[in-house]
Amino acid sequence: MEITKQIEIDYGHIVHLHNSACKNLHGHRGKIVARLEGDLVSQNVSDNGMVMDFKHIKAIMMKNIHDVLDHSFVISSEAPQVGAILQLSEVFYGGKMRLVVLDVVPTAENLAKWCFDAINPELVDTYGTGLKLTAVEFWETPTSCAIYRLE
């Protein structure tokens, strides 16, 4: 059985090596979809007939993805603008600007893998039903999506 859960975030980023408009600071309304597979719970318990309660998936996604990326600015540690952004954070936000510095360029593809890695440890066989996270979709816009699949 396959199930999915979706959350949404608002975030800003810069794709510093890109040759078009994405090299500028800009933002998106992103959607993240987690795809999970597993057997149905068959014990006589609250989750009988489910792969996993959607509420539990949402809680894991909110804690590890939403609460980190939502209303944050995401930038690569290699971007030439990173020093200025860190200085801006210090001067105007007392160093508390919601800033996520990654070791990779924050493309939809890299963010899909980042989201996968952020939630996978808490989802692996959570219910003893062979549960596994098989893919994460990262929708950067309503028409543009990157999908990271379990290898």
Image: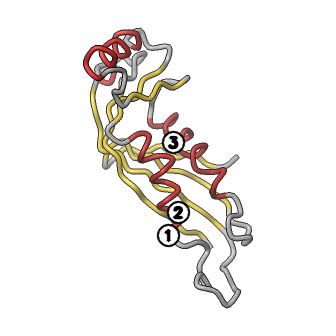
146 left or right of 20 in image: right
60 left or right of 51 in image: left
Name the residue type under label 2.
Answer: Ile
The image shows residue 30, relative to residue 13, as above or below, that is below
Pick the quarter of the image with the N terminus: bottom right
Q: Disc 1 on helix, strand or loop?
A: helix
- In the drawing, what numbered circle is on residue 57? 2
122 left or right of 89 in image: right
Label 2: few (<14), some or many (≥20) within 10 Å? some
Please name which of the two marks, 3 or 2, marks the residue nearer to the observer.
Answer: 2
Q: Disc 2 on helix, strand or loop?
A: helix
Q: How many marks?
A: 3
Q: Disc 3 on helix, strand or loop?
A: helix
- In the drawing, what numbered circle is on residue 54? 1
Residue 15 in the image, given as x and y percentages of width and height: 39, 22
| Mark earlier in primary sequence (1, 3) | 1
Contact check, label 2 and label 1, Cβ < 8 Å: yes
Residue carrying label 3: 112
